[in-house]
Amino acid sequence: MTIPDAMTAQWAAFDQLSLQQLYGLLKLRQDVFILEQASFYADIDGKDPQALHYLIQDPATQAVTGAIRIFVEPEVSTARIGRVVIAPEARGSGLGRAMMQAGIDKAREMAPGCRIHVRAQAYLEDFYCSLGFETVSEAFVEDGIPHIDMIRP
């Protein structure tokens, strides 16, 4: 699965994001995680400056329609993908699979052979399994939503 032709995709460190991109990223995460999912937590957690961000944008409007952030630790051969978010109008288009595959590819590029961790919303377990992740925890509630820990060996 690839990013639709009508969209642009890019990896960027936090300090490489334009103000427009940063605003779009934080707005999308707020709209989905806090408002849509009614999960009131501190999305701005101080970790974005250390993450590598993958943004999908609509070039016509510059709106961020999808994003993930990744933390790679090559010295211990691990990576963590998180804050996977897709705008409601882009869901069901394959964007999530394309973003996750980009994250897996980037992690393996930066730390070949690394284990990749995701803390997934429990209802998405089958989706992540289809990408090679294995469930490694029982379901638990985080920020009012059932989650599971998953690893891609």
Image (spheres, rainbow, N blue to C red):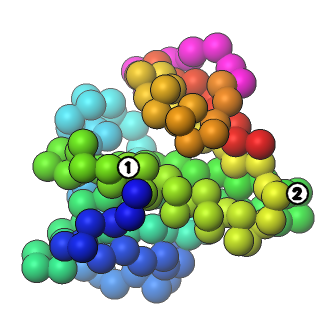
Amino acid at circle 1 = Gly
Work out whether mark 1 precedes mark 2 in sequence or the reverse, and give the earlier one. 2
Asked if residue 9 lies left or right of residue 79, the reply is: left
Q: Which mark is residue 76?
A: 2
Among all residues in the image, which is located at the extreme left? 60
Asked if residue 59 lies left or right of residue 151, the reply is: left
Q: Quadrant of residue 63?
A: bottom left
Q: Quadrant of residue 2?
A: bottom left
Please tell me whether mark 2 sits on a helix, a strand or a loop.
helix
Whole-percent x, y for residue 5 in the image: 24, 73
Whole-percent x, y for residue 74 in the image: 82, 65
Answer few, some or many: residues within 10 Å of disc 2's Cα (few below 14, many 20 plus, some between 14 and 19): few
Dominant SS type (magenta)? loop
Q: Residue at 42% of width from left, 44% of height from top?
A: 42
Q: Residue at 21% of width from left, 38% of height from top?
A: 35
Q: Which residue is mark 1?
A: 96
Residue 119 lies within the magenta run? no
Q: Which mark is residue 110?
A: none
Whole-percent x, y for residue 26 in the image: 31, 60
